[in-house]
């Protein structure tokens, strides 16, 4: 008999061992199915979370479309002026000429005139002359309460207004019937004017389709659902 | 018979892709015995083999989506078992003796009658090898990997793979010779040709 070659030696093992069967114990399958179930449980909450967030979005849609509260329009000057407290009639008078005064004050650096206006007046100014007066208006509007504002030091030039706003404690006068009046002055920034637009924003981030899963539309009468796309059920309000 | 089984294994593929537990169990029942014998060759005992089998099948069911259908499904599963065995070897590597030169040093090239050896004997022989030899011999001789593939899989050089294989063969032959009670017909010392790297100690990396 010849010495066996490496190749034959390997092949001998291969032939004998490659088709062998050996029955495993039952514990092996039990272990496998346990591990597979454990993995499945991990993915389960994800489905639930998806379902819950969908329900939240739809719920929000129904809730806000049910609210028919009218939106107040911007830019109406007269009601604000009419609602002024009588004791402040003088400052209303001032208001009507405020623009001129501020303009003249801004354009004349040496003018030491003090301009006295009230906050609700300033809100009106915001509507009409946003570009020139904004630095003043914003600071005052943040206070959101009636106060007299004194514009003191005058800027060097109109392009770079460095107007200082002095809110002196003595000139701040609180008014009692402010609640009603504040409704007339819509201080909400435009970008989040309704929950509907907020939901639109969030949905747009998630849903890239042309027809979003839910879409809101703002109009004079409030916010309502303008589009639904639940794959099987679609709804689109006419433009 | 063989054809029938292959057909049924491929039929089970779709069910496994849908993660149907009953189909998974069917696949396991069809292939478990075969795959355990694969694992046995890489393990030191039956318990370790069953561990590898379990981990391997969990991987099969999790990764079945990645199976593209080039080659047979069974072959793919078999490769997963082998890879699982290699991973297991890597984990245990530090605890094992990688090289035992004395064992190899005096091994003569002998001829012997292997036909009397049973499958069980061969399995025991392979299992008795130390982990590194066992791995390389299994991969090269039985799985049919090239030295290049083995080197990549194990993170060693091709030369190391070749020398490990030579040593593994020498040890196996020596053991067979002993089993047969020194029954050998011809003793030809071709050691110099067959084991050029016998003296080199090239332990596996990592």
Image (cartoon, coloured by chain):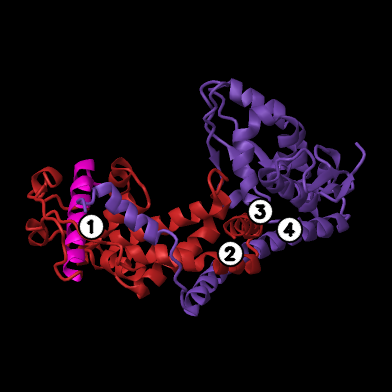
Q: From which residue to which does the magenta span run?
A: B155-179
State the separation of the CA atoms marked 2 and 1.
Answer: 32 Å
State the separation of the CA atoms marked 4 and 1.
Answer: 58 Å
Whether residue B182 is visible: yes
Q: In this rendering, is residue B21 above or below A219?
A: below
Q: Residue lying at the far bottom in this picture: please name it.
A: A26
Q: Residue at x 55, y 35 (%)?
A: A152
Rendered colour, chain B: red
Q: In this rendering, is residue B97 above or below A150?
A: below
Labels 2 and 1 touching (C-beta < 8 A): no
Residue denoted by label 2: B27
Q: In front here: A163 or B162?
A: B162
Chain depicted in purple: A
State the separation of the CA atoms marked 3 and 2.
Answer: 84 Å
Residue denoted by label 1: B133
Is residue B29 shown left or right of residue A55? left
Q: Quadrant of the rendered structure where residue B61 is?
A: bottom right
Residue denoted by label 4: A54
Secondary-structure class at tag 3 = loop
Residue denoted by label 3: A173
Asked if badge 4 and badge 3 are on a common chain, one would say yes
Secondary-structure class at tag 2 = helix
Q: Residue at x 61, y 67 (%)?
A: B26
Is residue A66 shown left or right of residue B160? right
Determine if the magenta segment contains residue B167: yes
Q: In front here: A85 or A56?
A: A56
């Amino acid at each position: 008999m010849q010495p066996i070659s490496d190749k034959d030696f390997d092949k001998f093992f291969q032939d004998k061992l490659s088709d062998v069967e050996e029955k495993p114990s039952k514990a092996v399958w039990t272990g496998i199915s346990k591990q597979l179930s454990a993995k499945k449980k991990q993915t389960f909450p994800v489905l639930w979370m998806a379902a819950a967030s969908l329900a939240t979005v739809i719920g929000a849609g129904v809730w806000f479309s049910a609210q028919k509260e009218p939106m107040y329009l911007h830019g109406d000057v007269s009601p604000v002026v009419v609602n002024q407290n009588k004791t402040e009639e003088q400052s209303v008078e001032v208001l009507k000429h405020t623009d001129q005064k501020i303009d003249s004050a801004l354009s004349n650096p040496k003018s030491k005139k003090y301009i006295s206006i009230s906050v609700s007046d300033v809100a009106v100014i915001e509507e009409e002359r946003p570009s020139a007066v904004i630095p003043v208006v914003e600071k005052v509007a943040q206070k959101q309460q009636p106060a007299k504002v004194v514009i003191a030091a005058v800027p060097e030039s109109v392009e770079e207004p460095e107007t200082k706003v002095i809110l002196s404690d003595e000139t701040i006068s609180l008014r009692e019937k402010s609640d009603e009046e504040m409704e007339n002055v819509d201080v909400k920034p435009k970008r989040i004017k309704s929950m509907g637009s907020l939901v639109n924003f969030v949905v747009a981030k998630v849903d890239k389709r042309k027809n979003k899963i839910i879409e809101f539309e703002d109009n004079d009468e409030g916010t309502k659902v303008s589009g639904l796309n639940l794959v099987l059920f679609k709804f689109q309000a006419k433009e | 018979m063989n054809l029938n089984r292959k057909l049924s294994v491929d039929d089970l593929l779709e069910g496994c892709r849908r993660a149907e537990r009953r189909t998974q169990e069917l696949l396991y029942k069809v292939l478990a015995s075969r795959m355990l014998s694969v694992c046995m060759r890489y393990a030191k005992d039956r318990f370790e083999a069953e561990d590898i089998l379990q981990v391997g099948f969990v991987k099969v069911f999790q990764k079945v989506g990645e199976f593209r259908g080039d080659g047979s499904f069974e072959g793919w599963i078999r490769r997963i078992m082998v890879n699982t065995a290699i991973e297991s070897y890597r984990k245990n590597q530090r605890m094992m003796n990688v090289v035992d030169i004395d064992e190899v040093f005096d091994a003569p090239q002998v001829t012997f009658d292997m036909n009397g050896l049973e499958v069980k004997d061969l399995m025991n022989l392979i299992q008795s090898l130390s982990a590194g030899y066992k791995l390389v011999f299994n991969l090269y001789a039985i799985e049919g990997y090239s030295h290049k593939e083995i080197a990549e899989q194990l993170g060693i050089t091709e030369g190391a793979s070749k020398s490990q294989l030579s040593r593994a063969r020498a040890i196996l032959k020596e053991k067979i010779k002993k089993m047969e009670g020194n029954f050998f017909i011809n003793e030809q010392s071709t050691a110099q040709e067959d084991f050029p790297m016998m003296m080199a100690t090239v332990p596996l990396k990592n």
